[in-house]
Amino acid sequence: MGGYKMKKILFMFSLLIISFISGCTNGKEFTIQFETYTGSEIDDIIYEEGSLFELPNIPLKEGHEFLGWYYDEELTERFTSKEEITRDLVLYAKYGVLKFEIKIMEPSGDLVSIMDRDYGFDLTTLEYGTLYSDSDLTQEYTILTLGAADLVLYVQDENYIEVDGIFIGSNIYAFQDNFMNGLVRPELERYVSTIDDVTLHIVDSQNNQALLNDQVDVFISQGVDVLLINLVNPSSASTIISKAKDANIPLIFFMKEPVEAGVMDTYDKVWYVGVDMADAGIKQGQMIIADWLANPDWDLNDDGILDYVLLKGEPGHPDAEARTFEVLKTIIDSGITVNELALQASYVWSTAEANNTMETWLSGSFAGQIEVVICNNDGMAFGAIQAIQAAGYDIPVYGIDALLQALDMIGDGEMQGTVLYDGVTLAKTSIDMAINVVKGFEITKDIPYTLDSESGTKAVRIPFVIVNIENYQDYQ
């Protein structure tokens, strides 16, 4: 009898355990489907309400990078796994088109042109004659669109087609730069495409001033009418100016302002278009001041001191130096005491490097003390935010550039604010100035800005704008 009672007790206990387990897992089930738009297929997920939800591996799509999941087909409402799931869902994949390098070479190996173009770019629009895949010029290249790989093509010297109208030779200091390659370069190309008889060639200087010097030589040999140059090293403007002056070609620097004293006075056909470098840091500082005063809970240790980390960008770069100095000066001048926990430079203003740096900081001894993250561009802010979210922290992050992704992140509450460097207006103004000088007009003809020549730079400057949760939609 004793054995029978014991078996009965164990049986009843087992039933209780099964009932308990069943009760813990008997939530509502929802089906989550994934629309990948010709990307790799992802199986539906059956999700039980209240359980931990893990997103599947990202879909792969040739020539594209995955940018996230969205609730709607218009890709306006972003989904994050932190949100509670209470219904069946269809999530839609958003992609960005990847860019690949096209090199045009002579059979001798001399460089004719370097450019970055989107996957699927129409190769028939390249302004060259017959293109070949080999330096012996035996295999004519007949593929019409750019695939998902860098491309090297060869052309005979005499096959280069002379450009009718105005020919602008330009560069971007590094296509790795999110702002320059993601906003400014596309706008330069788009705007020129709307103007008759104007041709623009843009090359990647790969963050190498010596390469840029060689590219300017190539432009001059190709007979450009005007040079539109984004310096790699702002202290090396004199070399470019000398080349332009010797060839009697007008020269406009943009985005990176020459810093050599008096160098702009050595040639009467050189100008600069950009911004007041101090203004970005000032505007960013004003945002931080207002938010710090409005959010006393940001002061994690209640000591009245703003403990920050700062991702600087390229050391020695005029923008990086000015932004760093001015944002801190603005905050300190307002009466707020600051404490620098860490500061890190990055030669390419890189999202990836910023992510690695932020990961290191968040695994260090002062991780729980960081109250504000200051970034000298949005690209680095993206990297910082990725690391912050992965580590489970919630820290306000500020950037500069007002890239579209930054505006989305402000709307989603992932980024506190940014400062609009109006790259669209700057690109248009740069092209308008280049056309004006070739046509012999006043440099600022039909441009709503005045020429600042008092500093000796002969500069057109475009103001910055604060962008935060209150007005980010105005710039989307």
Image (spheres, rainbow, N blue to C red):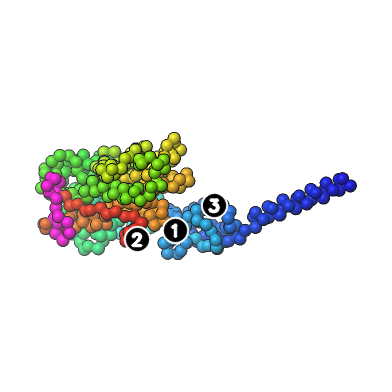
Q: Which residue position holds label 3?
A: 54
Within 10 angstroms of label 2, few (less than 14), some, or many (20 or more) residues? Answer: few
Q: Helix, strand, or loop for circle 3?
A: loop
In the rendered view, does 212 fall on the left or right side of 342?
Answer: left
The reply to whether callout 2 and callout 1 are in contact (CB within 8 Å) is no
> Is the magenta region chiefly helix, strand or loop?
loop
Gap in angstroms between the C-alphas marked 2 and 1: 15 Å
Q: Which residue position holds label 1?
A: 78
- Which of the two labelled residues, at mark 2 and mark 3, occupies the earlier sequence position? 3
Within 10 angstroms of label 3, few (less than 14), some, or many (20 or more) residues? Answer: few
- 426 or 19, nearer to the observer: 19
Q: Which residue position holds label 2?
A: 473
Q: Residue at x 31, y 40 (%)?
A: 337
Q: Helix, strand, or loop for circle 1?
A: loop
The quarter of the displayed image where residue 75 is located: bottom left
Quadrant in which the C terminus appears:
bottom left
- 230 or 199, nearer to the observer: 230
Q: Helix, strand, or loop for circle 2?
A: helix
Percent x, y for residue 14? Answer: 75, 50
Amino acid at the residue labelled 1: Arg
Gap in angstroms between the C-alphas marked 3 and 1: 16 Å
